[in-house]
Image (cartoon, rainbow, N blue to C red):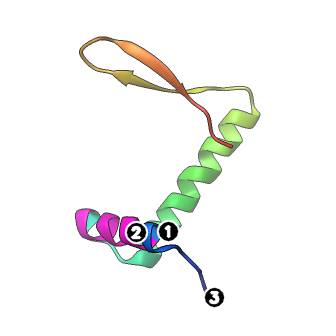
Amino acid sequence: MTLNLTDAEMAALEQLCEQKDMSKTAVLRQALRLYQLLDSRMQQGEKLFLEEPFAKEKKEVVVL
């Protein structure tokens, strides 16, 4: 399989690989599993929020 990424996308992937001490394949597999989980839950009507820990402010994450 060939995957075409922009320079910025490749840099982000390489940064994640270093931070997580994982291969590019492992990072992409994990990302796909996470996306699949989020997509499935959102199709069931659930919403995803991020909460700022000090202000307790919640913001909804919109996934296209």
Picture quadrant where residue 61 is located: top right
Residue 13, labelled with which disc? 2
Count of numbered circles in the view: 3
Marks 2/3: CA distance? 17 Å
Q: In the structure shown, which secondary structural element does the residue marked by tag 2 occupy?
A: helix
Quarter of the image where the C terminus is located = top right
* Outermost residue to the bottom: 1
Which residue bears the numbered disc 1? 28
Query: Is the residue under label 3 in contact with that under label 2 (CB below 8 Å)?
Result: no
* Above-or-below relation of 24 to 63: below
Marks 1/2: CA distance? 8 Å
* Above-or-below relation of 2 to 10: below
Residue 1, labelled with which disc? 3
Residue 16 magenta-highlighted: yes
Query: Is the residue under label 1 in contact with that under label 3 (CB below 8 Å)?
Result: no
Callout 3 environment at 10 Å: few (<14), some (14 to 19), or many (20+)? Answer: few
Point out the tag, 2 or 3, that comes first from the N-terminus.
3
Identify residue type, mark 1.
Leu
**Mark in the foreground, 1 or 2:** 2
